[in-house]
Image (cartoon, helix red, strand yellow):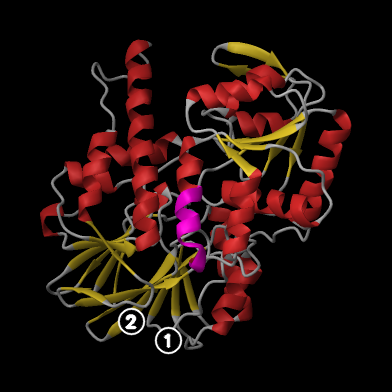
Amino acid sequence: MKITFLGGTETVTGSKYLIETNSTTVLIDCGLYQGYKNLRERNRQELPFDISKLDAIFLTHAHLDHSGYIPVLYKQGYRGPIYTHHATKELCKVLLMDSGHIQEADTRFYKKYKLSKHIDPQPLYDSATAEKTMELFKSVDYSETFSIGDIKAHLQSAGHILGAASIILEAEGKTIGFSGDVGRSDDVFMKPPEPLPELDLLLLESTYGNRRHEDSDPFTQLADIIKETIKDGGVLLIPSFAVGRAQSLQHILATLMKEDGIPRLPIYLDSPMAISVSDIYSRYQHETRLDKQDFDKMSAATTYTRDVEESKAITTQQYPHIIIAGSGMATGGRILHHFKRLLSNHRTRVLFTGYQAGGTRGAKMIDGVDHVKIHGQWIRIKAKVEVMNGLSGHADYVDLMNWLKQSSLRSTMPIQLVHGDPNALEAMRDHLRQNTLYDVKIATYKSTITL
Ligand SMILES: [Zn+2]
């Protein structure tokens, strides 16, 4: 069996691993490259294999860096099955269609301002293609075996986000584990990742291979920020990712207001995408740590503003309140309208709760710039900008080590490290080499290994 690394190597985006046996070809994950331009350009390059020979795609989870390239393969004629968890299928419908919309909007923008080197720039795919792609999904439960040709596989829960899985694949007498993105053992929302069975090879993610999460408790931190917001008589604006983060925030806020004596403030979830995702999360409550009452509490505490008129109505709210809106790095979405209205008010607080990529508006605000440009207009920042790092959906390197320890792995098992920036990969490799006997290597782009 051959494994070729076509993405998620020396970067955290574009995850794609091609598995070829004598009779069957499968792609594990089919992610979009994001971030730096030299990586994004790979989205426009042809994959180095014959798509007509691809028998199936197995998908670990819904994040676009793992799923966002599937509609490109659809456009190129792929019509085989996509096996993934039921919840991942539902989340993919929301995320892929949104991704198609964003690409259509970006292309219109490039055309209007003639910013592309191409005369007639085209989106990578549009939302209609994303929607058609959904016909190919065949969703399964955790532990349910599915097979294609001579390859057998099943999913096991990886924490991280709803539906996220590690994939255990068996073929030609070998068993390979694909960790997918691995969640934390103490996530506020998701259960800990399930330990791995004995394997002949593991592809292990290394996003936080060089970092430990802070010990600070997000409940206490958020409680303090809310108390300050009330004291100032202002508005708390939380730019948030739609999948996982917005729901964790809803849960923490609802719990604080119900149980910890924090005064009740109106909470607006002002993101149609996050609202759809919250709805999917509540239907899969059994896959999370929370019980039905927790979800009831969350929706009772939150005002969902789906359409634009409802969103505009928030502006009439005079008293302290909280607005959660996309996008997480303040690069787009409804949060920008609230920024334009409220950033120049010294009573406003802005809370960033996730990773801010270099160059984004979020990163600049955390760096302390005193103006930001929004929709062509410079806005003076008088608001207080705060950061909360305790809500990451990824295991740090200690969590990953503990996960391996709990698993039934052979002490000298080979590991290929994937899904990390170069520093994180090297730190993870060194840490594993110093503390274990695993045969650890860092996977490189387009390299092939044979088992
Ligand atoms: Zn992910």
Residue at 43%, 78% in the rendered image: 414
Compared with 14, 349 (above or below) is: above
Instruction: Point out the tag, 1 or 2, that comes first from the N-terminus.
Output: 2
Residue found at the very far right of the displayed protein: 231
Residue at 84%, 28% in the rendered image: 233
Compared with 265, 159 (above or below) is: below
Quadrant where the N terminus sits is bottom left
- Residue 282 on the magenta segment: yes
Image disc number at residue 198:
1
Amino acid type assigned to the residue bearing label 1 in the image: Glu
Q: Quadrant of residue 165?
A: bottom left
Residue 148: % across, % down:
18, 71
Image disc number at residue 175:
2
Residue 261 visible in image: yes
Magenta residue span: 278-286
Residue at 88%, 33% in the rendered image: 231
